[in-house]
Structure formats: C-alpha cells, structure tokens
Amino acid sequence: MEELKKALNEKGLKFSTLPEKGHCLFAARDFSPGEVIFSENPYVCLPNKNKCEWCFSSTNLKKCSGCRVIWYCSSECQRSDWKLHSAECRVLSKVDKQRVNSLTPSLRLMVKLCVKRKLEIEKIIAMSPMMVDDFNATRLSLHLLQKVTSMWKRWFLVSFGNMSDINEKQLLLYAQIANLVNLILPCPDFEINVKEITENFSKVRFLDIPLVAEVTAGNLACNAHTISDSELRPHGTGLYPFISIINHSCLPNSVLVFEGRLAVVRAMQHIPKGTEVLISYVDIAGSTLTRQKALKEQYYFTCACSRCIKLGQSDDIRESAVLEGYRCKDSQCDGFLLCDSDDKGFICQQCGLLREKEEITNITIKLKSMSEKASTLLSSGHKTEAIEAYKMIEGLQLQLYQPLSISLMRNRETLITVVCRVYPRSYPLVGLQYYMCGKFEWLLGETEAAVRSLTKALDILRVTHGTKSPFMVELMNKVEEARAEALYKLHSQVVN
Ligand SMILES: C[S@@+](CC[C@H](N)C(=O)[O-])C[C@H]1O[C@@H](n2cnc3c(N)ncnc32)[C@H](O)[C@@H]1O
C-alpha cells in the first residue's frame, strides 16, 4: 500500500478512501484543462476478436502456431509479446479444442494476469511498479475472478443456498476457482495460483474494504477497461491498476482516452488541489434513469452525483422526456410526453394530445429497417445512397422524437447544439461529433462549414486527446487541407 501511495504522490495524486465509494483518487496539486493527470500502460490486456495480440491491428493476421488461439500481425509483434505469451502459450495449447470457445475475454485476461504475476514472482520479468505492492494484484485478481464467475455463482447458490453469509462467500470463491481451473484450464504444469488468490482474498478482507460484500454482489466485474481508439471504437480490454482507482461521476472533471494501449487520463477542466479525480464509466448523455440503470447493472452502485440526486424531480422528469421521449403529435407543439395512465400511449404535457402506441411502433419499425439499410450502404461504400438513407432516418426521427432527443443527436450532425447541451464543453464526444459533422460537410462540398466544424473538433480534442496521436495529427492535417480548399474556393469566386 505504501508503494502505491508513494507512486501516486509522485504524480501529484493522493490515494484515499471514502465511506460511500471505497478507494478514490484526489488531486494533490492543481491540474489545468487538457493536462495529462497520468498515463498508464496496462498490466495485462487483450485485443477484441481477430486482432493482433500486441498492436491490435486487424490486418495480415497469423495464428500463433503454438497455442493456435491468438493472432499476430507480424513477427515483431510476436517477439514483443513473447516473454508473456510463451508461458501463456503453454497453458492455452493444453486447452481442449472444444473448450477453446469457452475462453471468454475475461478468462483469457485472468490467465494473463496469473501468468504475469507468476513470471514476476519468479523474477523472469521485472515487477511492475504498481504490483510491488500485493494490494493491487489482489484487487485485480478479485475483480477478474468475479467477472468470470457469475455462472459459477449461480451454480453455487443453487448448491449451497442456505449457508451463512460469510461461509457462502468463502465457498463461493473456492467454487469459482476450482471450476475455473478444472473446467476451462485443465493444465497440470501451470497452476493458476489458487493459494495466492485465496490468500489475497483474505488479505483484502483484512484491509477492511467492502470487497467481501461486493464479491457476492458481483462488483468485481468493473475493473477491466475497454481500450478504444481515438474515435472511441472499442479495440480490446486491459487492466490498469492506477486507473481502476478512479471513481465515476455523471459530471466528470477528467476523461480517459487511449493512445494505442496506453491509457491517458486528462483534466477536462481546472481541477483544484484536494478535488476528487472523476471520470465517467457510462455515456453521460442519457437520462438520469438510464445512467443509473447502466451503473447499477455494470458497476453495482447507485450514483449520487449532483445530476443523479435530481432523479424524480420535475426538472429531471422533463429533461428525461426531452432526451429520450417522444414528441407531440401536433408538430407545432413543443410539449413533452409522459406515459398515459391507461397505457394507450403518451400524453403531451402541454396540449393534452394522446400519441398512440401503435403509431409509435410503426415509425420505430421503419426506423430500424432504414438504419440497417443505411449502415449496409455505408459499409459497402455507397456513400451517396447512405447519405440519403441517413437523411430519411432523420426525417423519421423528427416525426417520432423530441427535437433535442439523444436519438436525433446520434444521427444528425446539425444537432451539435444538443451535444453541447448534454456534455461538458471539452468532452471527447462533443469533439468527435464536430469531427464527424466536419467530415460530413466536407463530403457534401460545404467546405467553409467543414472548416468551422473541424476547427471546433480540434479545439476540443486537443484538450482530451493531446496533439501527438496519429488521429490528432491527421485531424490537424485535415483542418489545414479544408482551410486551403475553402480559401481556394473563395479566391475562385472572387476571380470569376
Ligand atoms: C473501478 S472501481 C473504482 C475504485 C473503487 N472505489 C475501489 O474501492 O476500488 C469501481 C467501483 O467503485 C465504486 N464507485 C465508483 N464510483 C462511485 C460513485 N460515484 N459512487 C459510489 N461508488 C462508486 C463502485 O463500487 C464501482 O463498482
């Protein structure tokens, strides 16, 4: 624990505990907007399906000839990964062919975690600074264990339903580990260190962390991070010991982005010394109910941030109906709709008109089929037809939803005002929305508008993403190119 505190202190951060949240990270100095609070390589990570294990590329893939489970795009990538994979390869190559499919990402991450710990303890590879202290290994092992064991939990509860609370938890853990080892990885020459994990488990209890209670609640599922690219497309999953200490807020002051597998936490606003560093675990554009549902389902807690405590208040009901609800049947009326007590449909809270369920269902069906068509057209390179399809989606959405709804935001580039309204100004999604809008305008030949949107994107994304990643370099080049084109067009108009 001391090592962890020291490492954090060197980064201008303070490790602490809050009764309602558990561990948390505080700023031990001021951070300015755009400043990197810290960056961290994963302790272990893995790519999504059909990507290179090392660089996450999806081209030129060849299977590892040893285990025939994982892929590399080049021998360099294979070499870079070899120290860790050579041990993992022995484990994976022994997995029964029929069981290879049971190797879920969580299980593989668990195997990698155990392999890496083993190699570190045997001094085959250097100990990661964060793992010098057993505390973090413990947290990660437990978090992962929970992730892979929900089905075993069910099995356990059926078998040992009436045990006393604490016994249940201990037995649950043993059942999980035994099943993990026996069912999935029956590999005699590599032991997942059951003893170590079990010992760590009791240490965690000693530390007086609410983990024991959380184990049965399934709380440990929440420590693996999705590694996404600059456009927030998911590429893989990683375990980041430092980052896993940061708590959630629906009004975050920081943002987590990835540069390859490197995770970077940046301040989105001025963070004064003594403030908790907070990121968002879920899409914060949703209504309070949607956010709370997602947080409960995925992270097992009820958020009590300043947005969430408004749940059920009249402002919050109106905001939710605007963000996620339907519009009034009368296109001139801008009232918001609430569910009718007879369950026939939705009643406008301004003019009292009923919008029937059947009509809503019909438009929803049309929207679904049009969305499928649009994405097929786009992925098959039929850009002009795709644009037409997206415009039709917009038309249907305008019939169905509030003009400031999230559904419209997702589809409609002109709804950036909505984006700015729901997200803080420097939120990456706002920047990315401007970026998409700029690309779209450029495609349509609206170069001046494209320059404006791309410049706005750049202003925001340089705060959240920095300026060095290939994506940002490309964006800066795009802005320059669009500016040159706009100038050229202007010049041609003057000359003609
Ligand atoms: C990635 S961990 C964050 C560190 C965690 N507090 C700990 O003690 O290890 C995520 C877990 O932290 C807790 N948490 C995060 N943000 C919270 C919040 N705003 N309110 C309450 N609990 C929170 C939840 O238990 C959640 O599942």
Image (tube, rainbow, N blue to C red):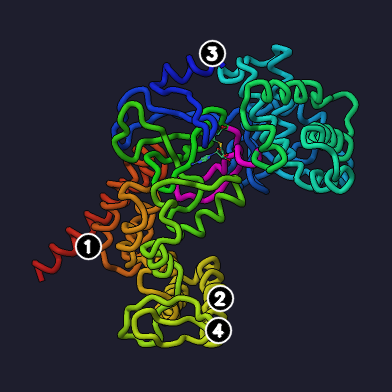
Q: Which mark is residue 368?
A: 2
Question: What amino acid is at disc 1?
Answer: Glu
Residue at the image point whose x is 65% and y is 24% from the top: 137
Question: What amino acid is at disc 2?
Answer: Lys
**Looking at this view, is 14 or 12 the one in front?**
14
**Looking at this view, is 465 or 142 the one in front?**
142
Q: Residues within 10 Å of mark 3 (few under 14, many from 20)?
A: few
Real-space CA distance between mark 2 and mark 1, rounded to the nearest whole angstrom? 33 Å
What segment is highlighted magenta in the picture? 220-239
Determine whether the residue tagged by mark 1 lies in a helix, strand or loop: helix
Residue 61 sits in which quadrant?
A: top right
Question: What amino acid is at disc 3?
Answer: Glu
446 on left or right of 439: left
Residue at the image point whose x is 41% and y is 87% from the top: 353
Determine whether the residue tagged by mark 4 lies in a helix, strand or loop: loop
Real-space CA distance between mark 4 and mark 2, rounded to the nearest whole angstrom? 27 Å
Dot in front, 4 or 2: 4
Asked whether the beta carbons under mark 1 and mark 4 sit within 8 Å of each other, the answer is no
Query: Which residue corresponds to mark 1?
Result: 448
The mark that comes first in sequence, 2 or 1, is 2
Real-space CA distance between mark 3 and mark 1, rounded to the nearest whole angstrom? 55 Å
Question: What amino acid is at disc 4?
Answer: Asp
Real-space CA distance between mark 4 and mark 3, rounded to the nearest whole angstrom? 61 Å
Residue at the image point whose x is 48% and y is 14% from the top: 6
12 on left or right of 22: left
Query: Which residue corresponds to mark 3?
Result: 2
